[in-house]
Image: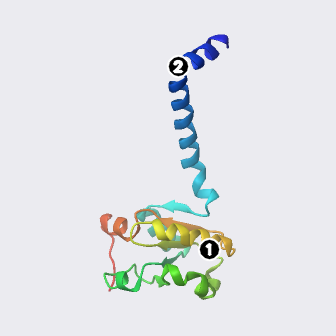
Amino acid sequence: MDQVIEFATNHWFLTLTLFTVLGLLAWITVAPGVFGSERVNPVEAVRLINHEGAVVLDVRADSEIEEGRILNAIHIPQPSLANQIKRLEKYRSKPVIAVCRTGGRSASACTMLRKHGFERVYNLGGGVVGWQSAGLPLVK
């Protein structure tokens, strides 16, 4: 034990780096649960939609929707979500997958859904861009 302490004091920068990396790894592992959503990739999202009746919530702006959207997605722009969250009440018992262009706005939508009592909330990792990259279709 004395050798470990001696090493840590002699090589404080390496020790600090080690604990920083360990802390970041812990953060990456714990953060999705803390902030209200679990990130899913497009393949997992398709499984949730097809086998568990998941609802897709698209929080992109109206202008972005014109490029295409996931089939049967409910569109509520992120800034309007707080005012229109009652539209989603009937889906409270189902998994909800929040989607935006790349996954940033949908993460905050997931947090809001959690605060309003939705339990099974998922953020589509990579957003619509990731969905298209996986070769999955959009409808116009």
Q: Dot 2 surroundings within 10 Å: few (below 14), some, or many (20 or more)?
A: few
- Cβ–Cβ below 8 Å for labels 1 and 2? no
Ranked by sequence position, the earlier of labels 1 and 2 is 2
Q: Which residue lies under the disc numbered 2?
A: 11
For residue 56, side relative to residue 135 (left or right): right
**Amino acid type assigned to the residue bearing label 2 in the image:** His
Q: Position of residue 34 (x, y in %)?
A: 64, 57
Name the residue furthest right. Answer: 117
Q: Dot 1 surroundings within 10 Å: few (below 14), some, or many (20 or more)?
A: many
Q: Position of residue 64 (x, y in %)?
A: 36, 81
Q: Secondary structure at mark 1?
A: helix
| Nearest the eye: 6 or 110 | 6
The CA distance from mark 1 to mark 2 is 46 Å
**Amino acid type assigned to the residue bearing label 1 in the image:** Leu
Q: Residue at position x 35%, y 85% from top?
A: 63
For residue 14, the mark is none
Q: Would you place residue 90 above or below residue 133 in this image?
A: below
Q: Residue at position x 53%, y 19% from top?
A: 11
Q: Residue at position x 59%, y 20% from top?
A: 8
Front label number (1 vs 2): 2
Q: Residue at position x 69%, y 74% from top?
A: 117
Q: Which residue lies under the disc numbered 1?
A: 113
Q: Secondary structure at mark 2?
A: loop
Q: Give the quadrant of the N terminus.
A: top right
